[in-house]
Image: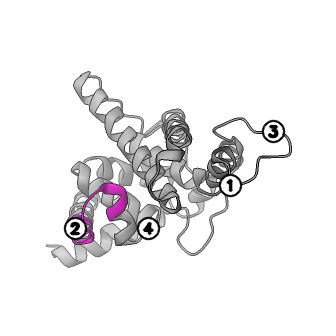
Amino acid sequence: MISPGEAAERGGARLKDMSPNPHGPAAVDAADAAAAARPPVSAADAGPPVSTAEGAVTALYEVHALGMIRLAHIMLGDRQSAEDAVQEAFCGLFRRWSHLADQESAVHYVRSAVLNHCRSVLRRRTTSHAPRDLTSRAEPVRSAESAVLTREERDEIMRAVRRLPPRQREALVLRFYLDLSAEETAITMGISPGSVRSATHRALASLGRMLQEQS
């Protein structure tokens, strides 16, 4: 009988294997690079100064879009929906730029907007009574994952992750897949760091048990 601690350790180890950044900056594939290179708003050839809304948002997009796309991709299961979520979030940031109380925290605003968009999409899928099981058809987030896990193993983990309650799933993805701190995750989810740690612990234990049952 697997103990809760062993289940949590197993769940964390398996999910960490899927992280695009387990030991440092991740290598990106061609699709990732192309998506991250597309700015959310048009810019002049020379580029506007970063002090303008357009320049600031474009600079944030170039640095953070890839991570945001990975977040949305793992939450929604398909690349196109993920890119749409990120594009909408950055466009929203551009429209609201002058109203931000703290422009230094813009990245937290965008990450929260992406997560909220994912929540809305998932709610629509549930209420439409047409849930989409895209696990078997979703594009890999990065091709180098195949060197760590087989496609079947990745599908197994994603099926288990998507069976978790929403808060646990979000905390797990943000903490282990994007390597955010508990504090950063709390800002994104709109909850306290303590709630993040609690949700993460429960998610890891549940994930470990599900993977144990499937093995």
Q: Main secondary structure of the magenta part?
A: helix
Residue 172 magenta-drawn?
A: no
Q: Nearer the viewer, residue 146 or 45?
A: 45
Q: Which mark is residue 130?
A: none
Cα–Cα gap, marks 3 and 4: 33 Å
Instruction: State the SS at label 3.
Output: loop
Task: Look at discs 2 and 3 and give the one toward the viewer.
Answer: 3
Q: Label 4 sits on what residue type?
A: Leu
Q: Which mark is residue 180?
A: 4
Cα–Cα gap, marks 1 and 2: 46 Å
The answer to whether the residues at label 1 and label 2 have Cβ atoms under 8 Å apart is: no
Residue 133 % position (x, y):
36, 34
Horizontally, residue 150 falls left or right of residue 134, namely right
Residue occupied by mark 1: 51
Residue 9 % position (x, y):
30, 75
Horizontally, residue 39 falls left or right of residue 129, namely right
Residue occupied by mark 2: 205
Q: Magenta residues?
A: 186-201
- The quadrant in which residue 168 appears is bottom left
